[in-house]
Each structure stands twice: as structure tokens, then as C-alpha cells.
């Protein structure tokens, strides 16, 4: 999963470092408040522990073994923000001291494994384990959380690698960095992670955290605010913002080099599907076209988004009630 | 005389001899794999310590300048576009390596894993079904289907491989010529939050402690293994070991925070540096900037 | 002058387990005190409470005339207190967290805002005093157990504390390092440092302590006085699990005697000497 130096163009590396900067900053601020004087030792030992987990071979049915990342384990034990820092530190040590993953690609690897993975795993777990679940449902929740989170990280990596030929080629069309396009990287990463690495992560996460819960329930991270509430708020904001995506698509983007546009629109929305409207709304240079013609379609957009989300939520809610165990 | 320890009969049975089964090798279970992984890790960790003390070019440069230069060279390698220019950079790295009394073979050995992986990954692009173009090596021709290695394909993978090699070897060279404490000290001069660097060096410190814990428990388990574990048993045991390591981590974290408080730590880490920049350090940094600017225009 | 004044102190662990019960004692300046107790008796906890690293649920701790609580240990008093009281942990790994020995010894003085030149001088002096100059640039994973102990003590001495609290200082030490430790404590006693050692090692009590406080397995103080007197009370020592009794035979003669984990045979009953 660790992307080595030389696979990503300097521009991609730069963008992902920039993307991680606010994440790191926020994580540091939050942890300083919650951990205070214990911050440094707790983060250091969590990172050390994450590093050691990454070294282990996890056996899965079939007799094979593989390595796991452990980001979801740390996220469930210490909370997602602590996981951001712990995994980032572990990745930094791996990259800087052991050449495992690149130093220029540290931003990208952190984005995938220290940001997307812990948060995805954390929220997936809390969605599936909502209410008062029994042992079995928790185990399954961890399994799915690890599996999904790993695949999301893999998808992000696939996109980062796959757009390289698109955004960084020599004048005669030669790819300068990772040479495979999205049509190859996505299926390749998807196959290997859906069929293998995702399983390792899921099984490993379930096995570790379940064991811990058997011995000491109190160890699991207790979120201050119900994480589901955060998700509702986030979802609400997204629904409201999606029409803006519609608006910006209608405008002329003459000032932007097509390559950069492809880069920004190409990978960010794919990597973060749900945040599509949000990201495009951040684009500067707002040309606001004639409102009226857009209002109706904007309204239709909001309604369908709201309907879609409501249906998904309803499904999960019903499943949760039926599946109380 | 009262006996304190009552020895059971089965424990009194002592039979010294050779095991009849030992001849056949057993499959490498994950316990063995983990032990191997940890042993090779420790070996790798300790490797730089033999080179950072030699009297060579890079060792004579202030660690902060050294790091600055290394980072700039890595970025330069990222910016270059042609086979010739990247090869030139590689030659420069080799020269620096020799001047620092480090055999180029050792550098190569350290970059081999990522190189081999990369080669394996991009090998298909060498062929015409990915990268069509002028024929270099014809593999076969069947009806209308040709398989050959194309010039463009070869060029593509050359650039990519050379770039990966260059970046990995520059970093390796830096690591080999700089002891771990100096790496962390050098980082302090960069715009990175202090607490992060303190956490970084502390992480490294306690990785060594945790690996020892993991190693001991794996060895102890291996010594008691009579038949291979089933997958489920194996996972159960591994989970218990990981929990053990986690507990140890938490204990240590608690202890370290008390130890830091006991010696006056109140939240802001105060450090002292003994580095001094000299003329040669500035020359080195200037040279790195020069190479970067050249590469940016290449 | 009384350095520590501990009154009616009780302590519970996080899981409601009892740690200490109704502890009353004082520590006078310049004295060398041993807190003797079996494992689990609470002696480490008592030491940590003295060091302001743990806080009692009942009772009070006064140090240098001022009340020590979580709230009072801030700002100027914290700086004063931390500079006066040095704590050596049972496990060296926990207090050696810096990249090199040099950094470790520098850590304490630097946090207390001692000028950098003076810090450098102190490091050199401490290295020489403890005979660990060759270890100056070593990384912790290259230190042996005995070396770690010396570095841990060095890192605390560089603060120049008036009070030294040591938790099980001789645990796991090889014989030569043990001898070194005894000599060091002797020297520190001569320069009038106040020393408190939590231990179950009777030889420390006999050789190094002016006074000894005994903790029972019920987490209370059962004895407080001079070593000669306290150690004479065999029944008490047996009861608190500091010593054990066993019998052995020399030919026709049966000896019953008691000794602690490190102490020598002290008497033979029922036979010749």
C-alpha cells in the first residue's frame, strides 16, 4: 500500500501534502486538548505499536499470510484523530528510516492510510455497531470496517497512481511517473484489495479488537459526540451543497489549463465520491450564469440527493433494528 | 525436613536423546515469518551505525545541511525527465557514496527491494501491447498478432526505474551517513512542529523495546510448538500477543509521561543543539540548490 | 527541617483496589530512609505520592512546608519542586526516552530553564562522577541493564535535587553494579542529600538507611524506627512477608533460620554456630 518515491509527480505529491496539512493541524490541536501532558508519550507509543503491527504477518483462511496497516484498530481504540497522528508518525519512520514508502509520497500515503482509512473505518464501525450490539455484531462491524477502510484507501491510491499518465507526461505522450492509467490501476488495486488485503485488514482488525474487548471493554474509544450525529450533519451539508456542483459545471473554465482541471476534478471527486459537491464548490473564479434556468434543475438535484440519502439511511436503520443482536 | 516443592512424577521423567522427526523441515508458518521479519528489521536498523562514523564527504557535513541537500536532490530526481539526465544524477550519487566511504554495492542492496518491485510492476509496459512503437526486440509473430519490445516502452521503463533508483539511493545514502539521533536533531531545523519530532524520536526509541517484547514472545511460542497451529488458533495467539504489546505500550506511555513530568516537563519540549554550520555546509547547500534549479528546467 | 509531612494518606487505584491506608510519617532533611515492604504493599505508590506523581484520595502531603496537590503543582512551585525532588523509576526504560545518553542527562536541566552552558558543564560532570563517559553518545537500545540504571540516575542527578526518591534501586542489578550503587548512595549521604528508597532488599536497609518504615501487605505502616531495632523484630518481618523461614539439615543437626531474599543467615537455632 505504501507508494514509493518516483511514482507520483511532484505536483501530485505537493497537492496531497497540502491536503494533509489541515488534517495534521486539526489532529494536533484536538489531541493537545484531550491528552495534554500525556500527548507525546501516548502518540509515540501508539505509533510504535502501529509500526509493530504493520510488521506482523496475519494468517487468513487458505493458509496465506499478509501484512495489515492497523489504522482501523488504532482508530477504534484511541479515536480517529489520534489514529491520524499515530499512523502518520509510523509512516514517517518507515519512509525516512527504512525506505518503506517514499518521503515525497509521504503526504499521499498519509492521506490514504492515516486519514481516509481511520475515519472510514471508525464511521463504518459505528454505523454497523449502532445501538447496543452484542459480541457477534461487533465482530462483524470490525471486520467490515477494516475491509471497507482498506479498500477506500486502496481506491484513493489507485486514483493517485492512475492519473499520473494523464497529468504528467512528456510532450510526446510518454508517462513520466507511474505509467498505468486509471483503467488499469483501479481494477488492479480493487482486485488485490477486495480479494486479499481487504480481508487481511478486516480479519486482523476484528481479531485484535475483539480479543481486547473480551478482556477489557473500557479500552475502546468512547466518542464525546455521537459519531452518527456528526455524520448526519455532514450529510446535511453535502446535500445542500450539491447544487453548487451543478452551477460550476455550467460555467466556462477557459482560464484553467485542461490538465490541471482533469487532475483536480479527475481524482478528488473519485477518491471522495460523497464530497463531490463540496470540493467543486471550493473552486475560485465564480462565474454565476443565469440563475433561473438552473434553479429548477438545482431543486431537482437537491430533492433527488435528499431522497437517495433518506433511502440509504432508512435501509441501515431498518437493518439495525432487525439485527439487534 | 519439610518439602516446599512437590515434584510430580511425570516431571521426573528425563529422556535425553535425538528426536526421530527432526529430519523433515516443517512449513514456514506465520510465527517463523514474523520472527524472520523482526530479525531482518533489527539487522537493517543497526546497519547505518557502522557507516555514520567513517570519515567521508557526507559525514563531514553538518547533519542539517546534509538533510537539506538530500531532500533537494530527491526533488531534483523527481523533476528530471530524460534518461541521460537521471543517469547523470545517479553517477553523482555514486560519486558521493564513494567519497563517503560507502561501497556502491551496499547502496544498491538497500534499494533492491523497491527496484525489483518496480521492475516487476512496469515490465508489461515494455511490450508493444501497452506501448507501441519502434521494434527493438521481436519476441514472436503470429498471424496478425506481434509481440515485441518497443523502443518507447524501453525508454519509459528506463526513466521510471532510474528515477525510483535515484530517489531511493539518495535517501539511503543520507541514512547510512547519519546516525538516528542526528536525523532527528536535523529535523528540528525544519518547519515541523517540535512535539512531532519529539514524538518521532520517542517512537523510534520504543519500537526497539516493543520489538524485543514481540520477539521474545514469538520465540517462546515457537519453542513450545509441537504441531502447526490451525489458522484459527494462530490468529487467537497472535491476537493475544498484539494485545500484550498494546498493554505494554500503554504501560510505558503512562510511565514515560510520569518520568517526563518528574523532570520538569510541562508541555513544551526544550532542547539544546550542538550543531555549528561551517563554510563547507553552505557550499553543499548551494550545490544542492544549483542541481535543483538545473533539474527544474531540464 | 521536615522535607515531607504525610498525614492520614490513603490511596485507591483506578479499579478501586486499595493502595495505601492511613499513612502517617515524616521525612527529615538529610536523612536516609528506607521504605520496606513486600511486593504489592504500596511502597512504590507511597514514593510516587511523595514525588507528586500520584495524589492521595484522603489525607495530605506537605513538601517543603507547602501542600502538594494536583492543583498546587503548577507554575513556580512546580519548577521549584521538580528541581528539588528527583525520582528514579524502578524500570529504567521508562525514564530513558531521549535519543542518546547525552540528551537524556540534558533533559532535566533544560526543562528547568538552566542556562545551556551550565547544562553542558553538568552533563560532563555527571558523566565523570558516575563513570559513564564512554556512554555519552550511546543510544538506549545499546545499553545493558546496569548501564541503563546508571544513566537513569545520572539523568536525575543532573537536576541537582536535594531529595532523591529511588524505587527498587537494586532490582535486577548485577553484583558489581550493586556495589557501585551502595558506594554512590554513601557519597550522596555524606553531602547531606535526603534519600528515600522503596525496597524489599534488607541489605539496603542494613547498610544504607538511617531509618526504616515498614509497610504491611494490608498497606499500612507497622513499624517506623532505626534499622537495628526494626530488623530485630523477626515476627513482624515474617508477618509482612519480608523474610521467610526455612529449615535445613547439616548431617544430624537441624537448623531453623530465617533470611530475606538478599540477606545473610543471621542465626542458627538448635545447633552449633
Image: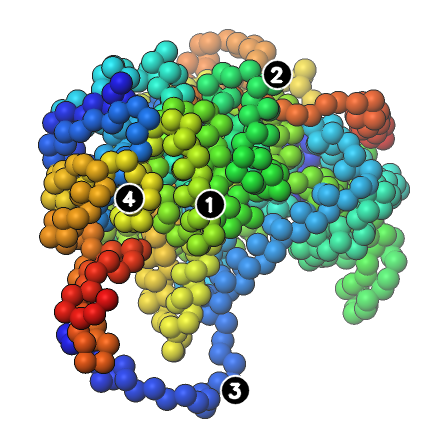
Which residue is tagged 2? A252
Residue C216 relative to residue A19: left or right = left
Quadrant in the picture for the C terminus of chain C? bottom left
- Residue C173: percent from left, percent from top: 42, 51
Which residue is tagged 3? B23
Which residue is tagged 1? C180
- Residue C63: percent from left, percent from top: 26, 20
Q: Chain of mark 4?
A: C
Residue A58 relative to residue B48: left or right = left
SS of the residue under disc 4: helix
Write down the quadrant of residue A312 in the picture: top left
What is the CA distance from the residue labelled 4 to the residue labelled 3?
56 Å
Which residue is tagged 4? C205
Q: Nearer the viewer, residue B231 or B70?
A: B70
Can I make out residue A99 in this image? yes
SS of the residue under disc 1: helix
What is the CA distance from the residue labelled 1 to the residue labelled 2?
81 Å
Amino acid at each position: 500500500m505504501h507508494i514509493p518515491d518516483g511514482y507520483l509527480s511532484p505536483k501530485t505529491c505537493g497537492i496531497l501534502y497540502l491536503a494533509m496539512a489541515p488534517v495534521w493541524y486539526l489532529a494536533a490541536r484536538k489531541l493537545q486538548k484531550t491528552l495534554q501532558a500525556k500527548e507525546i508519550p501516548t502518540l509515540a507509543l501508539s505509533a510504535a505499536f502501529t509500526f509493530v503491527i504493520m510488521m506482523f504477518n496475519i494468517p487468513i483462511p487458505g493458509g496465506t499470510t499478509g501484512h495489515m496497516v492497523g489504522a482501523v484498530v488504532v482508530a477504534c481504540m484511541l479515536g480517529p484523530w489520534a489514529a491520524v497522528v499515530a499512523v502518520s508518525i509510523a509512516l514517517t519512520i518507515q519512509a525516512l528510516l527504512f525506505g518503506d514508502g517514499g518521503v515525497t509520497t509521504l503526504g499521499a500515503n498519509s492521506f490514504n492510510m492515516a486519514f481516509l482509512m481511520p475515519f472510514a473505518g471508525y464511521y463504518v464501525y459505528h454505523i454497523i455497531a449502532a445501538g447496543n450490539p452484542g459480541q457477534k455484531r461487533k465482530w462483524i462491524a470490525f471486520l467490515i470496517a477494516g475491509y471497507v477502510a482498506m479498500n477506500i484507501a486502496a481506491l484513493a491510491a489507485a486514483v493517485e497512481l492512475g492519473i499520473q499518465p494523464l497529468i504528467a507526461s512528456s510532450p510526446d505522450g510518454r508517462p513520466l511517473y507511474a505509467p498505468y492509467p486509471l483503467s488499469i490501476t483501479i481494477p488492479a488495486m480493487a482486485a488485490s484489495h477486495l480479494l486479499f488485503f481487504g480481508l487481511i485488514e478486516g480479519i486482523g482488525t476484528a481479531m485484535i479488537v475483539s480479543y481486547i474487548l473480551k478482556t477489557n471493554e473500557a479500552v475502546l474509544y468512547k466518542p464525546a459526540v455521537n459519531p452518527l450525529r456528526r455524520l448526519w450533519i455532514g450529510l446535511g451539508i453535502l446535500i445542500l451543497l450539491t447544487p453548487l456542483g451543478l452551477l460550476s459545471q455550467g460555467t466556462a473554465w477557459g482560464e484553467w489549463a485542461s490538465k490541471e482541471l482533469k487532475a483536480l476534478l479527475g481524482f478528488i471527486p473519485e477518491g471522495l465520491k460523497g464530497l463531490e459537491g463540496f470540493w467543486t464548490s471550493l473552486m475560485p473564479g465564480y462565474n454565476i450564469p443565469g440563475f433561473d434556468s438552473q434553479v429548477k434543475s438545482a431543486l431537482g438535484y437537491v430533492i433527488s440527493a435528499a431522497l437517495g440519502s433518506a433511502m440509504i439511511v432508512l435501509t441501515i436503520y431498518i437493518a439495525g433494528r432487525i439485527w439487534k443482536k | 525436613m519439610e518439602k516446599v516443592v512437590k515434584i510430580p512424577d511425570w516431571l521426573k521423567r528425563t529422556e535425553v536423546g535425538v528426536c526421530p522427526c527432526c529430519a523433515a523441515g516443517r512449513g514456514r508458518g506465520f510465527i517463523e515469518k514474523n520472527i524472520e521479519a523482526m530479525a531482518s528489521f533489527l539487522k537493517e536498523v543497526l546497519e547505518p551505525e557502522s557507516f555514520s562514523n567513517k570519515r567521508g564527504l557526507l559525514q563531514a557535513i553538518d547533519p542539517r545541511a546534509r538533510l537539506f541537500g538530500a531532500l533537494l536532490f530527491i526533488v531534483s530526481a523527481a523533476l528530471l525527465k530524460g534518461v541521460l539526465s537521471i543517469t547523470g544524477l545517479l553517477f553523482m550519487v555514486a560519486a558521493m557514496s564513494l567519497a563517503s566511504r560507502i561501497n556502491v554495492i551496499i547502496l544498491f542492496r538497500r534499494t533492491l527491494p523497491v527496484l525489483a518491485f518496480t521492475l516487476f510492476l512496469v515490465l508489461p509496459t515494455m511490450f508493444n501491447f501497452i506501448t507501441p512503437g519502434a521494434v527493438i526486440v521481436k519476441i514472436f509473430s503470429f498471424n496478425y498478432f506481434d509481440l515485441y519490445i518497443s523502443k518507447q516502452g524501453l525508454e519509459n521503463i528506463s526513466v521510471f526505474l532510474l528515477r525510483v533508483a535515484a530517489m531511493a539511493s539518495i535517501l539511503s545514502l543520507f541514512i547510512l551517513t547519519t546516525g538516528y539521533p542526528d536525523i532527528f536533531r536535523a529535523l528540528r531545523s525544519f518547519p515541523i512542529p517540535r512535539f512531532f519530532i519529539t514524538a518521532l524520536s520517542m517512537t523510534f526509541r520504543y519500537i526497539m523495546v516493543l520489538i524485543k517484547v514481540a520477539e521474545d514472545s514469538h520465540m517462546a511460542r515457537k519453542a513450545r510448538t509441537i504441531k502447526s497451529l490451525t489458522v484459527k488458533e494462530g490468529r487467537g495467539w497472535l491476537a493475544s500477543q498484539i494485545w500484550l504489546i498494546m498493554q505494554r505500550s500503554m504501560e510505558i506511555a503512562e510511565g514515560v509521561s510520569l518520568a517526563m513530568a518528574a523532570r520538569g516537563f510541562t508541555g513544551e519540549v526544550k532542547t539544546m543543539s550542538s550543531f555549528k554550520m561551517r563554510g563547507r555546509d553552505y557550499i553543499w547547500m548551494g550545490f544542492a540548490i544549483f542541481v535543483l534549479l538545473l533539474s527544474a528546467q531540464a | 527541617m521536615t522535607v515531607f509531612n504525610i498525614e492520614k494518606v490513603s490511596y485507591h487505584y483506578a479499579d478501586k483496589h486499595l493502595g495505601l491506608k492511613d499513612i502517617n510519617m515524616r521525612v527529615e532533611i538529610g536523612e536516609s530512609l528506607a521504605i520496606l515492604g513486600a511486593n504489592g504493599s504500596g511502597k512504590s505508590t507511597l514514593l510516587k505520592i511523595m514525588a507528586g506523581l500520584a495524589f492521595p484520595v484522603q489525607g495530605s502531603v506537605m513538601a517543603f512546608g507547602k501542600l502538594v496537590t494536583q492543583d498546587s503543582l503548577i507554575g513556580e512551585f512546580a519548577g521549584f519542586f521538580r528541581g528539588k525532588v528527583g525520582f528514579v523509576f524502578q524500570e529504567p526504560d521508562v525514564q530513558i526516552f531521549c535519543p542518546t545518553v547525552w540528551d537524556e542527562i540534558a533533559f532535566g536541566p533544560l526543562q528547568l530553564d538552566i542556562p545551556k552552558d551550565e547544562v553542558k558543564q553538568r552533563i560532563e560532570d555527571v558523566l565523570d562522577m558516575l563513570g559513564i563517559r564512554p556512554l555519552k553518545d550511546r543510544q538506549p537500545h545499546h545499553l545493558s541493564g546496569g548501564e541503563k540504571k546508571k544513566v537513569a540516575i545520572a539523568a536525575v542527578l543532573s537536576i541537582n535535587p536535594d531529595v532523591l526518591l529511588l524505587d527498587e534501586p537494586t532490582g535486577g542489578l548485577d553484583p558489581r553494579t550493586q556495589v557501585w550503587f551502595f558506594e554512590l548512595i554513601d557519597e550522596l549521604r555524606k553531602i547531606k542529600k535526603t534519600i528515600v528508597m522503596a525496597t524489599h532488599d534488607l541489605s539496603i536497609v542494613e547498610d544504607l538507611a538511617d531509618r526504616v518504615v515498614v509497610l504491611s501487605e494490608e498497606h499500612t505502616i507497622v513499624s517506623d524506627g532505626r534499622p537495628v531495632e526494626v530488623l530485630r523484630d523477626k515476627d513482624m518481618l515474617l508477618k509482612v512477608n519480608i523474610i521467610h523461614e526455612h529449615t535445613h539439615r547439616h548431617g544430624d543437626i537441624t537448623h531453623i533460620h530465617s533470611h530475606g531474599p538478599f540477606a545473610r543467615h543471621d542465626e542458627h537455632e538448635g545447633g552449633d554456630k
